[in-house]
Amino acid sequence: MSMIAAFYGGKSILITGATGFLGKVLMEKLFRTSPNLKVIYILVRPKAGQTLQQRVFQILNSKLFEKVKEVCPNVHEKIRPICADLNQNDFGISKEDMQELLSCTNIIFHCAATVRFDDPLRHAVQLNVTATQQLLQMASEMPRLEAFIHISTAYSNCNLKHIDEVIYPCPVEPKKIIDSLEWLDDAIVDEITPKLIGDRPNTYTYTKALGEMVVHQEGRNLNIAIIRPSIVGATWQEPFPGWVDNLNGPSGMIIAAGKGFLRSLRATPMAVADLIPVDTVVNLTLAAGWYTAVHRPKSTLIYHCTSGNLNPCNWLKMGLYVLATFEKVPFEKAFRRPNADFTTNILSNQYWNAVSHLAPAIIYDFYLRLTGRKPRMTKLMNRLLRTISMLEYFINRSWEWSTANTEMLMSELSPEDQRVFNFDVRQLNWLEYIENYVLGVKKYLLKEDMAGIPKAKQHLKRLRNIHYLFNTALFLIIWRLLIARSQMARNIWLFIVSFCYKFLSYFRASSTLKV
Ligand SMILES: CCCCCCCCCCCCCCCCCCCCCC(=O)SCCNC(=O)CCNC(=O)[C@H](O)C(C)(C)COP(=O)(O)OP(=O)(O)OC[C@H]1O[C@@H](n2cnc3c(N)ncnc32)[C@H](O)[C@@H]1OP(=O)(O)O
Ligand SMILES: NC(=O)C1=CN([C@@H]2O[C@H](COP(=O)(O)OP(=O)(O)OC[C@H]3O[C@@H](n4cnc5c(N)ncnc54)[C@H](OP(=O)(O)O)[C@@H]3O)[C@@H](O)[C@H]2O)C=CC1
């Protein structure tokens, strides 16, 4: 019997960010392994014209929850959506709901965050710092609370090369930042943002670091653990391989590469591609929840949930695995044939951006205009290049995260728990994982049918022929122009023609002799 699964039985659990990528997988695993849990409260906001109930209905009726419905048929009754916006005071939660949360919650998983790299500082602080502070305040008023698990990121201290399982102080106290944001206007905040974030690449990593400091300072009387995952990818094993439902991180890049938009990247081929499957993160999170509540460590433990130190894979290998999978399961209606060129040189990257990305987009838009349609490819390509420029920081560096706490936690689990809540990435086979990831992107993100694969392959063949034809035509035109204008080009041409002639004459003569 799993001790962890038994621990969550009968518990009232509060999850923030349950509608997000990680939150959904967390909820699914909890229901599947501990169907006798009492209730899961989720803080949800209405979004995109959908009410809370509609959002929850959609999640519970998705493919991700198919297995849950078998083991926990009354899952609808055990999930309690609470209308909340983490940007508001007290999260805008009604008095009755707040009362219920305060008196009943046993465990908190705080997953909500803004994960956008380009968020203005004010918004990122509001969600990643102030909301965390408010949630800690709420937690301190919960008499039955056993553990508070805060999801951070392995990149919260990405300005360091080696990162230990400790909280590193930021030069400016989170409280001071929160206070000053109250009276500074947006223009000044934008101006001081680069100075505040210092050598971090964006407001996301900076505010996640501030969030950790808040947890450290204001959660002293609580039983807290912090999880720091690296780049979270599709599921590895559970509930089935390859599930993914958003475009963040590698998923969007896999689409862009598979559709032939992204063909070259400024990436360091040998840098570690620190991907971690979302189900691995969830298993570690649930194990940490159990350990924190049962063993009550004296200090806040930080768990690095990364793959690089135990089972490293680099970007070159990952790119090759992705490309190899495109051969087997190509995406439909690709713009160009998928290709992966990695360059570390800024100038050659700019060259490839112009030749491989912008030029084909401009030519295609010209064709669209000629055929009376609205041009769109150049705009899309510029957006993609902007996105890539924001990811470049992470694909040109390697980090070392120490994992003593994670390894300690693994050793504390019973053999049964090590199986049910497996977070040992040494068992991960990267090729198999990437194949399932690409397949998952095709099925769950692009909603493409497997029956369309032969047609997609046919389309890629046609693109290859167009590519050869285009290159040959381009070569001949350039060569013709050169011959017309340059004596040297003419000499080279005469040399090649006479060489071919001599070679053919020799070949003919020797075959006549043999006869
Ligand atoms: C050479 C070939 C290679 C071949 C093979 C290569 C294989 C694989 C390896 C490749 C290397 C992987 C590197 C990963 C590094 C990750 C590091 C993370 C480290 C930190 C980890 C964390 O702890 S952090 C959590 C992760 N956090 C993010 O990862 C957010 C980032 N991101 C944003 O911060 C915003 O994204 C940002 C960028 C501002 C743009 O912002 P933006 O406004 O311009 O664009 P949006 O993303 O908002 O999208 C606007 C609309 O485009 C739609 N769309 C977007 N992409 C689309 C697409 N590919 N295809 C169709 N449609 C797409 C979307 O659905 C929207 O549609 P609509 O407008 O209708 O809603
Ligand atoms: N994905 C990754 O690669 C990594 C993620 N992490 C961390 O994991 C956690 C989860 O990330 P992930 O699931 O990928 O992110 P998502 O963007 O998929 O999910 C974010 C969640 O936060 C909720 N949220 C955002 N703003 C508000 C708000 N104002 N009020 C209420 N809820 C809000 C979202 O709700 P809604 O659906 O309404 O928008 C959503 O449920 C984050 O803390 C992130 O920092 C760490 C490392 C890597």
Image (spheres, grey):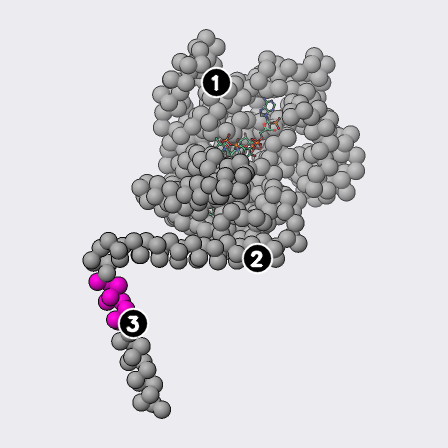
Vertical comparison of 152 with 328: above or below: above
Q: Nearer the viewer, mark 1 or mark 3?
A: 3
From the viewer's perspective, is 261 left or right of 420? Answer: left
Where does residue 203 sit, x and y in percent of width and height? 44, 25
Magenta stretch, main secondary structure class = helix
Q: Quadrant of residue 490?
A: bottom left
Where does residue 158 sit, x and y in percent of width and height? 41, 33
Q: Quadrant of residue 79?
A: top right
**Which mark is first along the chain, 3 or 2?**
2
Where does residue 30 sit, x and y in percent of width and height? 68, 36
Residue at horizontal 29%, vertical 72%?
500
Q: Which residue is mark 2?
A: 458
Residue reaching furthest to the bottom: 515
Q: Which of 310 and 265 lies nearest the eye of the viewer? A: 265
Residue at horizontal 28%, vertical 80%?
506
Residue type at tag 1: Arg
Vertical comparison of 252 with 333: above or below: above
Residues under labels 1 and 3: Cα distance? 70 Å
Residue at horizontal 57%, vertical 48%?
333
Asked whether the residues under the numbered discs 2 and 1 touch, taking CB atoms below 8 Å apart as contact, a structural biologist would say no
From the viewer's perspective, is 40 left or right of 74? Answer: left
Q: Which of 186 and 101 lies nearest the eye of the viewer? A: 186
Vertical comparison of 208 with 495: above or below: above
Disc marking residue 498: none
Q: Which residue is mark 3?
A: 500
Report helix, strand or loop for mark 1: helix
Disc marking residue 122: 1
Residue type at tag 3: Cys
Residue type at tag 2: Gln
> Which quarter of the rendering shows the N terminus?
top right
Q: Which residues, given as a range, are shown in magenta?
A: 491-500
How dense is the environment of label 3, judged by Cα within 10 Å: few (below 14), some, or many (20 and up)?
few
